[in-house]
Amino acid sequence: MMAWTSVCKINDILPNAGAAALLGDTQVAIFRVQDQFFALSNRDPFSQANVLSRGIVGSLDGKLVVASPIYKQHFTLDGGQCLEDPDVSIPHYAVRVDGDAVQISLSAE
Protein backbone atom coordinates (compact mmCIF):
# COMPACT_ATOMS: atom_id res chain seq x y z
CA MET A 1 0.00 0.00 0.00
CA MET A 2 1.33 3.40 -0.97
CA ALA A 3 1.72 6.15 1.61
CA TRP A 4 0.45 9.49 0.29
CA THR A 5 1.54 12.91 1.52
CA SER A 6 -0.42 16.08 0.72
CA VAL A 7 2.06 18.68 -0.52
CA CYS A 8 -0.07 21.56 -1.79
CA LYS A 9 -3.41 22.60 -3.26
CA ILE A 10 -4.13 22.29 -6.99
CA ASN A 11 -4.13 26.04 -7.50
CA ASP A 12 -0.75 26.43 -5.79
CA ILE A 13 0.84 25.22 -9.06
CA LEU A 14 0.21 27.35 -12.12
CA PRO A 15 -0.68 25.51 -15.36
CA ASN A 16 2.40 24.57 -17.41
CA ALA A 17 4.73 25.25 -14.50
CA GLY A 18 6.48 23.47 -11.68
CA ALA A 19 6.93 23.83 -7.95
CA ALA A 20 9.29 22.27 -5.45
CA ALA A 21 8.34 20.36 -2.32
CA LEU A 22 10.46 18.88 0.42
CA LEU A 23 9.30 15.49 1.71
CA GLY A 24 11.62 14.44 4.53
CA ASP A 25 15.02 14.99 2.95
CA THR A 26 13.81 14.40 -0.63
CA GLN A 27 13.26 17.35 -2.95
CA VAL A 28 10.46 16.76 -5.44
CA ALA A 29 9.58 18.78 -8.54
CA ILE A 30 5.83 18.80 -9.19
CA PHE A 31 4.48 19.85 -12.58
CA ARG A 32 0.97 20.72 -13.72
CA VAL A 33 0.51 20.26 -17.47
CA GLN A 34 -2.76 19.86 -19.37
CA ASP A 35 -4.62 19.32 -16.06
CA GLN A 36 -2.30 16.43 -15.19
CA PHE A 37 0.24 16.36 -12.39
CA PHE A 38 3.70 14.80 -12.52
CA ALA A 39 6.33 14.39 -9.82
CA LEU A 40 10.05 13.96 -10.45
CA SER A 41 13.21 14.34 -8.46
CA ASN A 42 14.12 18.02 -8.28
CA ARG A 43 17.82 17.14 -8.71
CA ASP A 44 19.40 17.63 -12.13
CA PRO A 45 21.85 14.71 -12.46
CA PHE A 46 24.15 16.68 -14.77
CA SER A 47 24.63 19.80 -12.63
CA GLN A 48 23.87 18.11 -9.26
CA ALA A 49 21.64 21.10 -8.44
CA ASN A 50 18.03 20.96 -7.22
CA VAL A 51 16.56 23.06 -10.03
CA LEU A 52 14.24 20.96 -12.21
CA SER A 53 11.10 22.53 -10.68
CA ARG A 54 12.24 25.77 -12.34
CA GLY A 55 12.64 24.16 -15.76
CA ILE A 56 10.58 24.94 -18.80
CA VAL A 57 7.84 22.39 -19.57
CA GLY A 58 6.83 21.55 -23.09
CA SER A 59 6.61 18.82 -25.68
CA LEU A 60 9.52 17.25 -27.55
CA ASP A 61 9.16 14.35 -29.98
CA GLY A 62 5.57 13.92 -28.77
CA LYS A 63 6.59 13.56 -25.11
CA LEU A 64 5.87 15.96 -22.26
CA VAL A 65 9.22 17.09 -20.88
CA VAL A 66 10.94 19.52 -18.58
CA ALA A 67 14.17 21.18 -19.72
CA SER A 68 16.78 21.65 -17.02
CA PRO A 69 17.42 25.37 -16.50
CA ILE A 70 21.18 24.77 -16.30
CA TYR A 71 22.42 22.54 -19.14
CA LYS A 72 19.04 22.16 -20.92
CA GLN A 73 18.73 18.36 -20.99
CA HIS A 74 15.12 17.22 -21.36
CA PHE A 75 13.50 14.75 -18.94
CA THR A 76 10.16 13.08 -19.65
CA LEU A 77 7.50 14.04 -17.13
CA ASP A 78 5.94 10.58 -17.03
CA GLY A 79 9.12 8.59 -16.46
CA GLY A 80 12.12 10.83 -15.82
CA GLN A 81 14.07 9.57 -18.85
CA CYS A 82 16.69 11.95 -20.26
CA LEU A 83 16.08 12.32 -24.01
CA GLU A 84 19.66 13.34 -24.79
CA ASP A 85 21.30 10.49 -22.86
CA PRO A 86 19.38 7.17 -22.70
CA ASP A 87 21.64 5.97 -19.87
CA VAL A 88 20.36 8.70 -17.54
CA SER A 89 17.01 8.92 -15.80
CA ILE A 90 15.80 10.55 -12.62
CA PRO A 91 13.36 9.16 -10.04
CA HIS A 92 9.71 9.85 -10.69
CA TYR A 93 6.97 9.48 -8.14
CA ALA A 94 3.30 8.62 -8.03
CA VAL A 95 1.11 11.71 -7.78
CA ARG A 96 -2.64 12.04 -7.37
CA VAL A 97 -5.26 14.63 -6.60
CA ASP A 98 -7.56 14.07 -3.63
CA GLY A 99 -10.21 16.80 -3.53
CA ASP A 100 -8.09 19.90 -4.11
CA ALA A 101 -4.96 18.43 -2.51
CA VAL A 102 -1.99 17.26 -4.59
CA GLN A 103 -0.53 14.14 -3.01
CA ILE A 104 2.75 12.34 -3.66
CA SER A 105 4.04 8.91 -2.75
CA LEU A 106 7.82 8.67 -2.52
CA SER A 107 7.73 5.03 -3.51
CA ALA A 108 9.45 5.30 -6.91
CA GLU A 109 7.26 4.09 -9.76
Image (cartoon, rainbow, N blue to C red):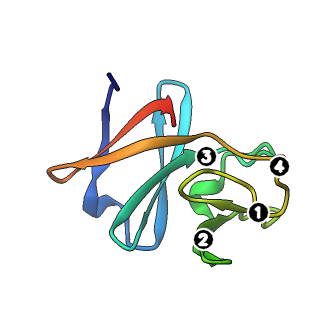
Judging from the image, what secondary structure is the residue with disc 3 in? loop
Marks 2/3: CA distance? 19 Å
Residue at mark 4: 47
Q: Quadrant of residue 12?
A: bottom left
Which one is earlier in the sequence, the residue at label 1 or at label 4? 4
| Whole-percent x, y for residue 15 in the image | 38, 73
Mark 1 in CB contact with mark 2 (< 8 angstroms)? yes
Between tags 2 and 3, which lies in front?
A: 2
Which is nearer the eye, 1 or 40?
1
Could you tell me the amino acid type at mark 2? Lys
Could you tell me the amino acid type at mark 1? Leu
Marks 3/1: CA distance? 17 Å
Which one is earlier in the sequence, the residue at label 1 or at label 2? 2
Quadrant of the image for the N terminus? Answer: top left
Residue at mark 3: 42
In the picture shown, does residue 50 fall above or below 58? Answer: above
Which one is earlier in the sequence, the residue at label 3 or at label 1? 3
